[in-house]
Amino acid sequence: MPQTPRSSEILVRIYRLLLVAYPASFRREYEQEMISVFRDMAEAAWRRGRRAGLLWLAWCVWWIGKVRKDIASDGEEH
């Protein structure tokens, strides 16, 4: 399927939402760069027709952020 700017931007919006799982200080420092890299990867993957891989990548980013957040909150409880 041909790449459309809209499809790429929808994925970037989802990715941006998933980045909320990261600590605010980390996002302030790295969010724009992470989004830029993801956008480039998304566009390349859409051109190659690999949408499932992008969804998996987005899920991994969310999961990593969640684990980091859980670890940080566990440290605060002790």
Image (cartoon, rainbow, N blue to C red):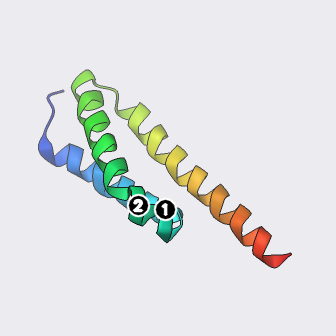
In the drawing, what numbered circle is on residue 36? none
Residue drawn at x 78%, y 69% is: 74
The one of 42 and 3 positioned closer to us in this rendering: 42
Is residue 72 depicted above or below 49 in this figure? below
User: Element at badge 2?
Assistant: helix
The one of 15 and 71 positioned closer to us in this rendering: 71
Residue drawn at x 81%, y 77% is: 77
Report the residue that reaches farthest toward the bottom. Answer: 77
**Residue density around tag 2, few if under 14, some if 14–19, many if 20 or more, within 10 Å:** few
**Residue 37 x %, y %:** 32, 41
Q: Is residue 35 left or right of residue 78?
A: left
Is residue 44 depicted above or below 78 in this figure? above
**Residue density around tag 1, few if under 14, some if 14–19, many if 20 or more, within 10 Å:** few
**Residue 40 x %, y %:** 26, 37
Task: Please identify the quarter of the rendering in which residue 55 is found.
Answer: top left
**Residue 25 x %, y %:** 49, 68
Report the residue that reaches farthest toward the front. Answer: 29
User: Element at badge 1?
Assistant: helix
Quarter of the image where the C terminus is located: bottom right
The one of 5 and 41 positioned closer to us in this rendering: 41
**Residue 12 x %, y %:** 29, 51
The one of 18 and 28 positioned closer to us in this rendering: 28
Residue tagged by mark 1? Answer: 26
Residue tagged by mark 2? Answer: 29
Task: Please identify the quarter of the rendering in which residue 16 is found.
Answer: bottom left
Q: For marks 1 and 2, give the CA distance.
A: 5 Å
Q: What residue type is labelled 1?
A: Phe
Residue drawn at x 18%, y 27% is: 1
Assess whether mark 2 and mark 1 are in contact (beta carbons under 8 angstroms): yes
Q: What residue type is labelled 2?
A: Glu
Report the residue that reaches farthest toward the top. Answer: 48
